[in-house]
Amino acid sequence: MLTFKTAGESHGKGVMAIVDGLPAGVKVDFARINEKLARRQQGYGRGGRMKIETDRVEVFSGLRHGKTIGSPVGLLIHNKDWENWQGVMSVDKDTNPTEKEVVIKKDGRIRKIDKEVTRPRPGHADLAGVLKYQQDDIRNILERASARETAARTAVGGLLDNFLHYFDIEIISHVIQLGEIESCSPEVGLAELKAGIRDSELACYDQDKEREMKEYIDRIKEKGDSLGGVVELRTSPLPVGLGSHVQWDRRLDGELAQAILSIPAVKGVEIGPAFENSSRTGHDVHDEIFYQPDKGYYRKTNRAGGLEGGITNGEPLIIRMAMKPIPTLYRPLRSVDIKTKEPFTASIERSDVTALPAAGVVGEAMLAFILARAMLVKFGGDSIRETINNYRGYLEMID
Ligand SMILES: Cc1cc2nc3c(=O)[nH]c(=O)nc-3n(C[C@H](O)[C@H](O)[C@H](O)COP(=O)(O)O)c2cc1C
Ligand SMILES: C=C(O[C@@H]1CC(C(=O)O)=C[C@@H](OP(=O)(O)O)[C@H]1O)C(=O)O
C-alpha cells in the first residue's frame, strides 16, 4: 500500500516526507518536483515568508541514478528561515532558560520577541492545540499546524506525478472564486487551461477577473483582513475502475474528500458541481451514456465529476475545494491571553492575506497521492514494468 508521512516544524530545520510503496524503476525528474514546489510558493497575496524561502527538494533515499529502487523515498526541504529562528527553535536544551525574550532576525531586522506565545488566534490551531497537548507555549502547536508542512506534501505530489506520467495522468488546479469574486470553470481541455493560467498570479483563467481579484486583495490587505475562496482541481481522463462501490472506505470520493479536507484551511470539498447539482432534477444532472464502436462508451457531459459509485468512470475528475480566510489577521479579532486570561487585540507582523493558488498546488499533490495509491491498489507491481503490464492487460480486457 502506498503511504506517506511528513515531519518538520515551520521555523525548524526543514520539512520532510517518507513515501513508502512506490514500485522500483520509476524515473524521477527532480525538475518536476521543484517546479511544483516553486508554484506552491507563488500567488498574489502571500506574505513575507515566501520571499525568504526558495524551496528545493533534496532526495535523501530510495533512488539510484534517477530511478526508484522500491525502498522508501525520503524527501527533504530545508527551511531557510531556520537560521533566523535558531534561538527559538533549538531541538537541544534551552540555551537561555531564564530569558523572557529571545532575539530573532525577522524580515531582515533583528528583533526581540516574547519567548512564549500566549495569544491564541481565532481560526488557527492555537487554543485547541494547547489545551489538548497541555502546553503553556502556543509555539509548540503553531509550528506544526503551520501550512509550511504542505511543502513536504507538495514534494510528495511532484514525486508521484513522475509515476502518474507513465499512465498519462495529469492534474491541474485553478482558482474559480476568491472571496466574493467568482470566475468561471472554462469548458476547455487541460492543455488550454494550463496555458490560460500560466501567466496568472492567481491561477485564474479569466484575466479580467484576475485583475479584479488582485485589486480586491489589495483592499482587503489595507483593511488588515484576509480571504479564502474556491479552487478547482481537474485531471486528464482517468482509467475506468479506480476505487470501488463494495465498501465505504474503498469509495474513491470518500478517500479524495479526506485527503483534500486535510489541507490546512480547506473546509469544503465537492465532486463535480455537487452543490449546484443538489438543487436540480435527475434529468438535468446525470450524464447520459452513449456508445460508438470506435469510441466505446462515452458521455457528452461530466456533471458527476468523473465518479459514479465511488469508481472512476473514464471521465476527467473534477473536484472543488473551499478554503476559509487566513486566520492570522493584521487587524486581529478579539481573543484572550492564555497566561493572564486578559482580553487583547495585538497586531501581528507577517502573514498571507490569501494562499488560495498555493492551496491549489497542495490539492494537486493530495490528488496525485490518492490517484497513485488507487492505481497501485488496482494494478499492483513491485516494478513499474509490472504495473504497466497489468494496466495494459486490464485495458485490453475491458476494451
Ligand atoms: C498554503 C497555505 C498557506 C497558509 N498561510 C497561512 C498564513 O500565512 N497565516 C495563517 O494564519 N494561516 C495560514 N494558512 C492556514 C492555516 O495553516 C490553517 O488555517 C491552520 O493550520 C488551522 O487549520 P484549519 O484552518 O484547517 O482549521 C495557510 C494555509 C495554506 C494551505
Ligand atoms: C511557511 C509557509 O506558510 C506559512 C503558513 C502559516 C500558517 O500559519 O499556516 C504562516 C506563515 O508562516 P510565517 O509565520 O513564518 O510567516 C506562512 O508563511 C509556507 O507555505 O511555506
Image (spheres, rainbow, N blue to C red):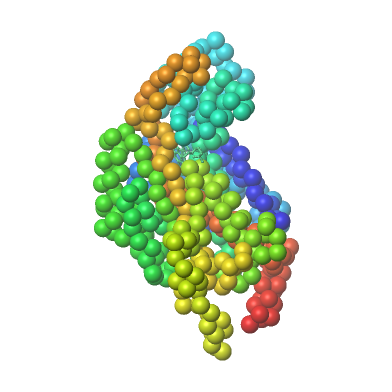
Which is nearer the eye, 205 or 132?
A: 132
Residue 387: which quarter of the image?
bottom right
State which quarter of the image contains the C terminus: bottom right
Residue sitting at the far right: 382
Q: Is residue 14 visible?
A: yes
Which is nearer the eye, 283 or 246?
A: 283
Which is nearer the eye, 150 or 343?
A: 343
Q: Position of residue 41 (x, y in %)?
A: 43, 46
Q: In the image, what residue occupies the spot 55% across and 14% down?
A: 96
Does residue 382 appear to the left or right of 118 in the view shown?
A: right
| Residue 388 in the image: above or below residue 366 | below
Q: Position of residue 4 (x, y in %)?
A: 65, 49
Q: Position of residue 260 (x, y in %)?
A: 54, 51
Residue sitting at the far top: 98
Does residue 311 appear to the left or right of 320 in the view shown?
A: right
Q: In the image, what residue occupies the spot 67% across and 72% down?
A: 391
Does residue 7 appear to the left or right of 37 in the view shown?
A: right
Q: What count of labels does the image hold?
A: 0
Q: In the image, what residue occupies the spot 71% across and 69% down?
A: 386
State which quarter of the image contains the N terminus: bottom right
Q: Is residue 108 visible?
A: no
Q: In the image, what residue occupies the spot 51% across and 36% down?
A: 146
Q: Position of residue 318 (x, y in %)?
A: 49, 63
